[in-house]
Amino acid sequence: MKTLKDVAVGENAIVKRLSGEGALKRRIMDMGVTKGVEVFVRKVAPLGDPIEVTVRGYELSLRKAEAENILVE
């Protein structure tokens, strides 16, 4: 299964599952990234950190470590 980090710029992905534990997982969920939500990847910095996405109409920046814990299809 691929992670949000593997999604190309300009593509949509559906969140299947969140991995990770504790504060990292809580931060992801607090941003509104939960199972079944559609995520649009807007921009990725040249070194891959941060990844800018649109979730539920909000523009967010995710760290590469956070994106690796979001499993998508």
Image (cartoon, rainbow, N blue to C red):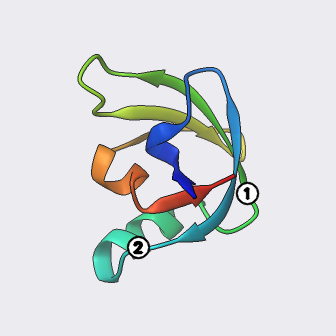
19 lies above or below 1? below
55 lies above or below 49? below
* Dot 1: element: loop
Query: Quick one: 25 or 71, which is closer to the camera?
Result: 71
Q: Residue furthest left?
A: 47
* Dot 2: element: helix
For label 2, the residue is 25
Q: Amino acid at mark 1?
A: Val
55 lies above or below 33? above
Q: What percent of the width, then of the height, locates residue 61?
A: 41, 38
Label 2 Cα neighbours within 10 Å, binned few <14 / some 14-19 / many ≥20: some
Q: How many marks?
A: 2
Q: Amino acid at mark 2?
A: Lys
Label 1 Cα neighbours within 10 Å, binned few <14 / some 14-19 / many ≥20: some
Q: Residue at x 69, y 52 (%)?
A: 73
Q: Residue at x 44, y 42 (%)?
A: 5
Q: Earlier in the sequence, mark 1 or mark 2?
A: 2
Q: What percent of the width, then of the height, locates residue 21?
A: 35, 81
Judge left or right: residue 65 versus residue 27: left
Judge left or right: residue 65 versus residue 28: left
For label 1, the residue is 37
Judge left or right: residue 21 versus residue 18: left
Query: Quick one: 56 or 39, which is closer to the camera?
Result: 39
